[in-house]
Image: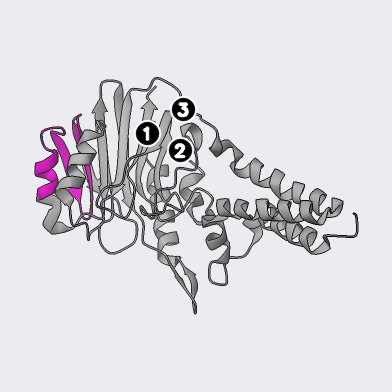
Amino acid sequence: MWRRGIATAVLALVLTGLLVFHADLPNRVGNLGSLLETFLPWFGLALPPLLLTAVLRRSVTALVAVVLPTAMWLNLFGGLLTEKSAPGGDLTVVTHNVNAENHDPDGTAKDLVAAGADVVALEELPEDQVTRYAHDMAAAYPYHSVQGTVGLWSRYPLSGARPVDIKMGWTRAMRATATTPHGKVAVYVAHLPSVRVKFDAGFTATQRDAAADALGEAIAKEALPDVVLLGDLNGTMNDRALASVTSQMRSAQGAAGDGMGFSWPASFPMARIDQIMVKGIQPRSSWTLPRTGSDHLPVAARLELP
């Protein structure tokens, strides 16, 4: 029983190494570390086959080895599987990449209004559809601002709306102050550059990484203590390249979500790249909304302001 299943045990140890030392995998070649971290939760799918093989082989060695990656995966992601939402909260926010090629913007706007949020952030807004979204959402959201390809709609007054320079050459991030009944909140909306997986270049994320650093610097300089970041960051909370943002903010989904909360692609969500992050604010619940005409799912959160 100890000599059988050596190959299974070796595979289990390799998986353990990837889970434990993922942050040490270099990004110098094709951003391999970021690519692995983006889909790191899916490594858990290897655990049942490894366990089944160990049982069928009746190998104690393999069974012991499989315990290691199982424990590590649960340590990293087990908390996401539990229900962490709590009642309460006084500000509901939604973020949605509406997709520039969305063939039903009116339906998408209607679905977002029906969600009943207080603040809605939209990314990838085509210039020729801004007026349609503004018209469709005007009754529910009397205040809005669009900067470049991102926009913010609010039930509460907005002030100080301005672009945020994330080093792209055109505007894909903004900042505004929402004056809520519980005080002022700095709301950032961002759409970081897309990433691609190419055979000859690996995970092409250089522009995304530079934009994330610029966004992190802008948020670090924010004067208001209560900050919300809404947007498509084209990266997950595990991706080290977003550390300039994730190191100073909490994920609403991580703190108060139910399940993995994957948001992209909408047809078969595999990663949570649409984020709601907070600083100085307590998340109470977080969830994804039903699919719209976009290739992303809308993401929502209920927040408790100080």
Q: Label 3, label 2: how many angstroms apart (C-alpha)?
A: 9 Å
Q: Label 1, label 2: how many angstroms apart (C-alpha)?
A: 8 Å
Q: Position of residue 8 (x, y in %)?
A: 77, 60
**In this view of the protein, which residue sits in the foreground, 125 or 106?**
106
Q: Look at label 1 and name its amino acid.
A: Ala
Res 75 quadrant in image: top right
Tell me which residue sits at (26%, 20%) in the image. Answer: 181
Vertical order, 233 against 203 (above or below): above
Q: Earlier in the sequence, mark 1 or mark 2?
A: 2
> Marks 2 and 1: in contact by CB < 8 Å?
yes
Q: Which residue is mark 3?
A: 85
Name the side, left or right, on which 268 lies relative to 74: left
Q: Which residue is mark 2?
A: 253
**In this view of the protein, which residue sits in the foreground, 207 or 268?**
268
Q: Position of residue 182 (x, y in %)?
A: 30, 21
Name the side, left or right, on which 48 lies relative to 200: right
Mark 1 surroundings within 10 Å by alpha-carbon count, few (fewer than 14), some (14 through 19), many (20 or more): many
Point out which mark residue 273 bears: none
